[in-house]
Image (cartoon, rainbow, N blue to C red):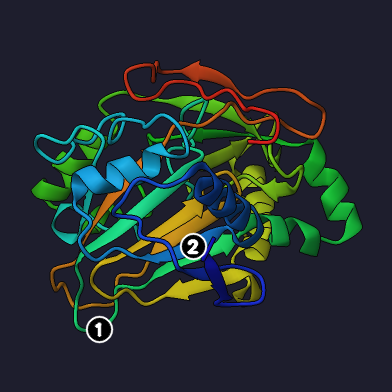
């Protein structure tokens, strides 16, 4: 097998060559890519010649697909493809995809369609490295905490910046209200690694007030976004980035002066997160069964 990996940073990210992702993959190739994802958390592929159907077929090697999003419309005629389009809003906040449902996607693929001449990078952070960076007292505390994740918040946009178009986007995003409790420290089902499972949708620590919660979440989040833990990917056209949504966070930098920027996203259905005590996440509000199946983790998958 000719799969070749070149690390991009010490802690996260690798370029993958020697595999044509526009064609069906052999089981050994899928296993090698899965293992590389377990190690490097984010993988970059050449996607020349890949269309929406090809992106779906590639992602399907790793499990059932989710639909595009629980509340946001898909690409017309492609129900599994979400347009990540600067004209439809900017995801310039740290988050893990769709953690407000009980089984967020296990993996996310992003394919570059329209790239601005400057800016528009995607940051991807290694949440397992962040957990390992915690001092022992903070690690012990984090192991015991649960956080409530929800899509019903301001997405880090101040009220004075909200125009009618942005208000309509926000209304659509929260058209179904979701609240889910997840462990702050998630155990990865394939590697056994522990990672900080927080990000922008985590709004409150269970059992604490909002002000108390924010102080703790900000403290832990600062470890996730340490520069040493972050891959800053500068897109070129016809690239695909696959990242492990179980144990990373990401951020789309809004630094391109409003120029067109478009990626297409396809996500793979995930399992229900499990904390260090073996307890599973649980839904508080909102049914996401129209969006995703619940993945079963096979031993050795």
Residue nearest the observer in this picture, 251 or 268: 268
Dot 2 or dot 1: first in sequence order is 2
Secondary structure beneath dot 1 equals loop
Q: Nearer the viewer, mark 2 or mark 1?
A: 2
Secondary structure beneath dot 2 equals strand
Q: Which residue is mark 2?
A: 43
Residue placed at 19% from the left, 76% from the top? 116
| Residue 272 image position (x, y, % from top left) | 59, 26
Q: Residue furthest front?
A: 1
Q: Which residue is mark 1?
A: 118
Residue placed at 20% from the left, 34% from the top? 172
Residue placed at 29% from the left, 30% from the top? 67
Residue nearest the observer in this picture, 287 or 128: 128
Q: Quadrant of residue 131?
A: bottom right
| Residue 139 image position (x, y, % from top left) | 83, 51
Of the 4 image quadrants, the one containing the N terminus is bottom right
């Amino acid at each position: 097998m000719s799969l070749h990996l070149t690390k991009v940073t010490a802690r996260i990210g690798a370029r993958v060559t020697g595999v044509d992702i526009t064609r069906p993959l052999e089981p050994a190739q899928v296993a090698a890519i899965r293992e590389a994802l377990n190690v490097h958390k984010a993988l970059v592929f050449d996607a020349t010649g890949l269309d929406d159907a090809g992106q779906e077929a590639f992602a399907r090697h790793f499990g059932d697909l989710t639909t595009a999003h629980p509340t946001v419309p898909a690409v017309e005629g492609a129900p599994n493809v979400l347009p990540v389009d600067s004209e439809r809003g900017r995801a310039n906040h740290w988050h893990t995809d769709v953690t407000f449902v009980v089984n967020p996607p296990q993996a996310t693929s992003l394919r570059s369609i329209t790239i601005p001449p400057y800016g528009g990078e995607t940051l991807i952070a290694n949440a397992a490295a962040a957990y390992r960076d915690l001092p022992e007292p903070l690690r012990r505390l984090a192991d015991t905490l649960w956080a409530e994740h929800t899509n019903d918040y301001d997405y880090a946009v101040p009220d004075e910046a909200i125009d009618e178009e942005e208000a309509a986007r926000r209304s659509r995003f929260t058209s179904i209200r979701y609240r889910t409790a997840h462990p702050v420290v998630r155990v990865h089902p394939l590697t056994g690694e522990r990672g900080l499972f927080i990000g922008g949708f985590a709004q409150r620590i269970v059992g604490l007030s909002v002000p108390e919660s924010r102080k703790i979440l900000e403290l832990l989040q600062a470890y996730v976004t340490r520069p040493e833990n972050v891959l800053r990917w500068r897109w070129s056209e016809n690239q695909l980035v696959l990242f492990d949504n179980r144990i990373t966070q990401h951020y789309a930098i809004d630094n391109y002066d409003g120029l067109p920027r478009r990626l297409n996203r396809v996500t793979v259905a995930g399992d229900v997160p499990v904390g260090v005590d073996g307890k599973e996440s649980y839904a508080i509000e909102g049914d996401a069964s129209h969006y995703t199946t619940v993945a079963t983790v096979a031993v050795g998958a």
